[in-house]
């Protein structure tokens, strides 16, 4: 075998290896790509199923407590999707005084997971950055607006873990402990609601 034949054989072997690798990775890409969902006759993917939901949003108020606000919106039927839609509605509403918005700047639900009645909520400001700095009372109402809205509307949720940009912070803005799962505080609700929630002292 002369040098020219040997060089041709080496080049041919290398080409076979390259073609094999290309086919291998192309096959992996096709396997990793999810199959397209069903489409409507016009070729468009049908919208996800939703249903009309009636809920009570709990918003900060000038009284230093949370206040209820009825809301009607569309949400998925399953609990995790409904929880996400509930918070999206909470953050989008612009109430009349004495009620106030939860966050002064737009905040979205980056991700929400529901595990064993604990809702893990990852909040993300659309403009990026740290949580808005504020006083302790405003921060308390912001945090528990989310907690009360989820727990009081969804039987599948009994506690809430808050994250900001994927990180569970010791405090959202330095005042309220968010390093552990949170449950509603009856003392933040209107006096008549708090009184109703308290067990009677006499039989």
Image (spheres, grey):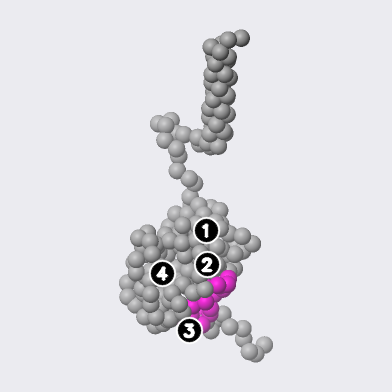
Q: CA distance from mark 1 to mark 2?
A: 13 Å
Q: Disc 2 designates what residue?
A: 168
Foreground mark, 3 or 1, reads 1
Q: CA distance from mark 3 to mark 1?
A: 31 Å
Percent position (x, y) of residue 147? 51, 70
Percent position (x, y) of residue 162? 51, 67
Q: Disc 3 designates what residue?
A: 191
Percent position (x, y) of residue 70? 43, 67
Q: Which residues are magenta?
A: 176-193
Q: Earlier in the sequence, mark 4 or mark 2?
A: 4
Seen as rendered, the residue at the extreme top is: 1
Q: Earlier in the sequence, mark 3 or mark 1?
A: 1
- In depth, the one of 42 and 14 nearer the eye is 14
Horizontal side, residue 184 vs residue 99: left or right: right
* Residue 15 placement: quadrant: top right
Q: Disc 1 designates what residue?
A: 112
Mark 2 element type? loop
Q: Earlier in the sequence, mark 4 or mark 3?
A: 4
Mark 2 surroundings within 10 Å by alpha-carbon count, few (fewer than 14), some (14 through 19), many (20 or more) = some
* Circle on res. 131: 4
Seen as rendered, the residue at the extreme right is: 203
Q: Residue at x 43, y 81 (%)?
A: 136
Q: Is residue 98 inside the magenta stretch? A: no
Q: Is residue 144 above or below residue 119?
A: below
Q: Residue at x 49, y 46 (%)?
A: 49
Q: Earlier in the sequence, mark 1 or mark 4?
A: 1
Where is the N terminus found, in terms of image quarters? top right
Where is the C terminus found, in terms of image quarters? bottom right
Mark 4 element type? loop
Mark 3 element type? helix
Foreground mark, 1 or 2, reads 2
Is there any visible trace of residue 56 in the rendered image?
no
């Amino acid at each position: 075998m002369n040098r020219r034949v040997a060089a041709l054989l080496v080049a041919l072997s290398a080409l076979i290896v390259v073609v094999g690798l290309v086919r291998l990775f192309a096959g992996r890409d096709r396997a990793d790509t999810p199959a397209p969902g069903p489409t409507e006759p016009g070729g468009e993917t049908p919208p996800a199923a939703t249903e009309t939901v009636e809920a009570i949003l709990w918003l900060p108020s000038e009284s230093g407590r949370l206040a209820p606000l009825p809301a009607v919106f569309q949400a998925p039927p399953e609990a995790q999707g409904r929880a996400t839609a509930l918070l999206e509605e909470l953050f989008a509403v612009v109430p009349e005084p004495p009620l106030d918005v939860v966050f002064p700047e737009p905040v979205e639900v980056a991700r929400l997971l529901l595990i064993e009645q604990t809702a893990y909520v990852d909040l993300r400001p659309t403009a990026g950055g740290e949580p808005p700095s504020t006083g302790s009372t405003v921060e308390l109402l912001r945090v528990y607006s989310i907690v009360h809205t989820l727990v009081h509307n969804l039987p599948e949720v009994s506690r809430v873990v808050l994250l900001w940009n994927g990180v569970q912070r010791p405090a959202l803005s330095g005042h309220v402990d968010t390093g552990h799962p949170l449950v509603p505080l009856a003392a933040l609700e209107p006096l008549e609601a708090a009184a109703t929630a308290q067990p009677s002292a006499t039989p």
